[in-house]
Image: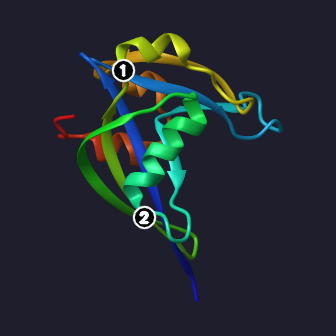
Amino acid sequence: MGNTFLRVKGIIKKNDRYLLVKRWVDDRIPDPFVWEFIDAEVQHGESPDDAVHRAIREQLSIEGNIDKIEYIWSNMLGDTHCVGIAYVCSIAEDDEANIVLPEEFGEYEWVSREEFPYYIENQYVLNDLEGKTL
């Protein structure tokens, strides 16, 4: 019998640019970092909205605001079913200067939507973003 878990994604938008973070995934490969949006697994008893707020706070050291739910995704990873909710979020303009990344993140960058394929390698994420208004 497989497992099911719920993830949230915080797509932080400022004007026409989106915040991507470079997360460490595995030091046994040539490029151990991948670019992605803020994300987290929803903890037992936690609401998805609270989880995305927590993820922004833990991964950027600032508070975020939920603007809307953009899409919901579902995929299988072996016998594990991953269901997720992607939120479009914002941060206060003053908070951008206060971003502090945890140790497992290399850097962050604001990129345009057209630049996503140059940063995001996960084809599932790129496919999910197709046709979305963000």
Picture coordinates of residue 62, whole percent (x, y): 51, 28
Task: Say if 84 sits above or below 114 in the image.
Answer: below
Mark 2 residue crowding within 10 angstroms, few (<14) / some (14–19) / many (20+): few
Q: Amino acid at mark 2?
A: Asn
**Left or right of 85, for residue 20:** right
| Mark 2 element type | strand
**Where is the C terminus found, in terms of image quarters?**
top left
Q: Nearer the viewer, residue 132 or 18?
A: 18
Which residue is identified by label 1? Answer: 92
Of pointers 2 and 1, the one earlier in the residue sequence: 2
**Where is the N terminus found, in terms of image quarters?**
bottom right
Which residue is identified by label 2? Answer: 75
Picture coordinates of residue 115, whole percent (x, y): 36, 19
Q: Nearer the viewer, residue 10 or 34?
A: 10
**Left or right of 2, for residue 92:** left
**Left or right of 26, for residue 49:** left
Picture coordinates of residue 58, whole percent (x, y): 59, 38
From the viewer's perspective, is the residue at label 2 or at label 1 nearer? 1
Picture coordinates of residue 41, whole percent (x, y): 54, 57
Q: Determine the residue positioned at 54% across, 27% down.
A: 21
